[in-house]
Image (cartoon, rainbow, N blue to C red):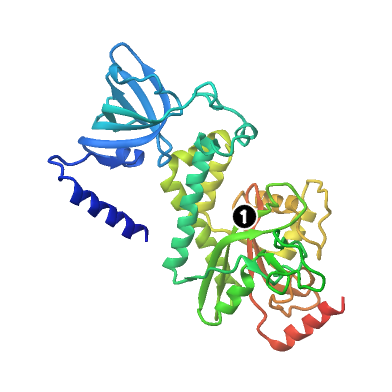
Amino acid sequence: MFGARCLLRALRRCSSAPCPKHPQAVRLSVREAQEAQEAAADVKVQGWVRSVRSHKEVLFLHINDGSSFESLQVVGDPSLEKRDLTFGSAVEVQGKLVKSLHRKQNVELKAENIRVVGPCDNLAFPFKPRERQPLEYYRQFPHLRCRTNTLNALLRVRSEATAAIHSFFKDNGYVHIHTPIITSNDCEGAGELFQLRTSNKVSEPGENPHFFDVPAFLTVSGQLHLEVMAGAFTHVFTFGPTFRAEKSQSRRHLAEFYMVEAEISFTESLQDIIQVIEDLFKTATSIVLSKCPHDVELFHKYVSPAQKGRLEQMLKNKFIIISYTEAVEILKQAPETFTFQPEWGSDLQTEHEKYLVKHCGEVPVFVINYPYNLKPFYMRDNEDGPQRTVAAVDLLVPGIGELCGGSLREERRDFLQSRLESFCTR
């Protein structure tokens, strides 16, 4: 529809006006302009002003359109300066790309015309040039905060990471499934769901209050839908919004977040799942580092200085695999005092997970074979004697703890039936 409308508009324009004798200026993004290897005439760049400096003989602008961390330098005659050409204003600059004398940039834009598309009131604008504020300050301005370097960089990194994840699964033969956001199932079984109700109608006595005839919720996981799809496709994945109604206002318990989930049919080895997780992690990380080097460097410098070395360690080393039993023994022998005492059969806490990664040299760690009673009924019983475990795995990473997990599914009907019965009698 969009393409058809644009084409119709273009045809009307051509039929009502003579074709120009000279070609129009080529529109470039800031990134495209910066990556240009040669000088070019008649180019146009649009963006927002990051700085303005006017000297007696030359006018300097730095503009950015969000496509690159670095701004594009614009040079022009001081006569091009306008009263509303200020920090934060939206501009369109037309001119020539020329070789730059500055050693940190390849080209700069020599302006022939500068048009202020959207002026910015410097007194009312909450951000100032070369002024760094805490994130809490930026969050007060949700309509403008994405213009700041930190959040601008964060969103570019997230965009590249999302594309890298999709690319990884596509390259490895997975079918992308759009699992429902509104669902009647409770995948986690923890009761921490957001229930949906209509807000514009009061139910009459005796009338079903549910829009869908049954209670409906925002999804906490697409796993159940993916497991059905895995009966028709051998490799499936989803990457969509997930909602958890946990009463915890922290970075680890978001009410809304995006989650990657995948299912593989005909898999009999936990090692297969471990390899997929490690390959996905390393592929996505490598792509982000190569596509967003300046954005990542900003976070290494101001947000998480120790992360740079950790990333290099993670990419060049094979991830470590230890059993849950080994993990508990390491924690029991640790010189540190934990808030939660490590015991076999108890969940690993965040403090335990971080210590295990630190103990293993800040390299991500796979913990496998968890106690039978700690994990959901569908995880495969290892049949391993008195210390009964299931074929489950969690990936622990530096500074975070658990990042993702998986398991072999129990395919033996009698085992499933027995475990379901034991769950029902608890």
Residue 206 vs 353, above or below: the answer is below
Secondary-structure class at tag 1: strand
Amino acid type, callout 1? Phe
Quadrant (top left/top right/bottom left/bottom right) for the N terminus: bottom left
| Side (left or right) of 2 relative to 96 | right
| Side (left or right) of 373 relative to 225 | right
Residue 79 vs 73, above or below: the answer is above
| Side (left or right) of 248 relative to 117 | right
Residue at image position (77%, 73%) is: 207
- Quadrant of the rendered image containing residue 344: bottom right
Residue at image position (67%, 70%) is: 392
Q: Nearer the viewer, residue 328 or 299?
A: 299
Q: Which residue is mark 1?
A: 257
Q: Nearer the viewer, residue 132 or 393?
A: 132
From the top left corner, tell me how far across and down residue 130 is, in percent.
50, 24
Query: Around disc 1, counting alpha carbons within 10 Å, would you say few (fewer than 14), some (14 to 19), or many (20 or more)?
Result: few
